[in-house]
Amino acid sequence: MLSLSRSWRGTTVTKCIVSTCYCNRMHTDGLPDSTADVVAAAGDLLTSSERRIAEAVLAEPTLLAFGTVSDLAKHVGTSRPTIVRFAVKLGFDGYTELQIHARRSLSHQLSRPSERIRRLGESGAASAQVMLEEALAGVFEAVDNDRLAVIGRMIARAGAVWIISGETSRAGAHTLVSGLSIVRPGVQLVESHTAGADLAEAGPGDAAIAIDFHRYRSQAVSTARTLKDTGVWILAITDGPLSPLAAVASVRIDLDIPATGPFDSSVPAVAVAELIVARVAALLHDQATQRIDEVERMWEATGTFLAEA
């Protein structure tokens, strides 16, 4: 038996090794090591095929947590036995045990605020800053210029734009509604109590932006499915290929949503929303200019803002 200590993002993780098996997968605070911790500790032992698997599951943790052996093998382009050997190389009895561990490690990020607040330590603010910086950097990787160009064109040309949101993604949704409604007409936030009447007017030629993350709001998912059935083009802003919104999306943006304290961060969703609004405003430059001027006149006429000193 050999004791191995390795630092990962500021956390020292100590593991006991018997042959190639890692028998301690818990942080000192009682939480399971993340998948990244386990992979990092075994990194020198992985073959090139196993490294591809590791890269895939670190990029999309939900593939490991909720996908089958076949799902992961197909995604990586390898065989099912290779997936099982990868799990064993990390010190697990097989894929099922690795998957259980992955689900537990995700629970810290995906658990309810009432549970998170009980586990929040004094270092929460510092770690939140690091996670926000990483998540924001991930936004610019997820929203490359080509994808943003397609999204901008579809929203600029759409007859109407429908915004669908869950509870934890409202900040991003309101940023979209606030910005897009000033640069173009026909932007509507679909509320649960008016969804039936609102959706009666939707159809081909429209665009929808469905934005929601883990603990997906049932109303957001059902509304997105209904719009897809009516021929509406849909952009899904969500957290991975296993999100229920992924199945209805024409285009999808996957975001890393960190848990900042007891709550999921709104920063990545708001950042994406602002990028979309800026692109649509640029595409509709003349029309957007006229509309903004008219909105400014209405604000002035109705005394929306306090008079400048």
Image (cartoon, rainbow, N blue to C red):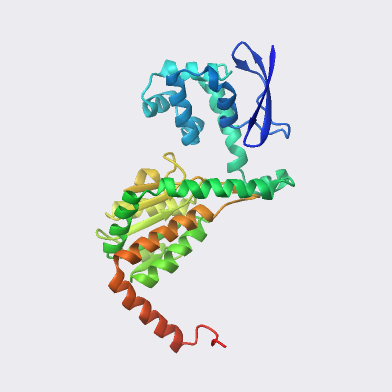
Q: Identify which residue, 232 or 92, lies in the foreground.
A: 92
Image quarter (top left, top right, bottom left or bottom right) of the N terminus:
top right
Residue 172, horizontal then vertical, whole percent: 48, 59
Is residue 66 visible in the rendered image? The answer is yes
Q: Is residue 169 placed above or below 244 in the rendered structure?
A: below
Q: Identify which residue, 212 or 252, lies in the foreground.
A: 252
Q: Is residue 21 placed above or below 287 in the rendered structure?
A: above
Q: Is residue 184 placed above or below 49 in the rendered structure?
A: below
Q: Residue at x 55, y 85 (%)?
A: 306
Q: Is residue 222 placed above or below 279 in the rendered structure?
A: above
Image quarter (top left, top right, bottom left or bottom right) of the C terminus:
bottom right
Q: Identify which residue, 244 or 172, lies in the foreground.
A: 172
Q: Identify which residue, 176 or 196, lies in the foreground.
A: 176
Q: Residue at x 57, y 37 (%)?
A: 106
Residue 287, horizontal then vertical, whole percent: 29, 73
Q: Residue at x 44, y 31 (%)?
A: 56
Q: Is residue 252 left or right of residue 39?
A: left
Q: Residue at x 37, y 26 (%)?
A: 74
Tally the numbered discs.
Answer: 0
Classify residue 102 by image quadrant: top right
Residue 57, horizontal then vertical, whole percent: 48, 31
Residue 18, horizontal then vertical, whole percent: 65, 12
Is residue 158 visible in the rendered image? The answer is no
Classify residue 154 by image quadrant: bottom left
Q: Is residue 183 left or right of residue 238?
A: left
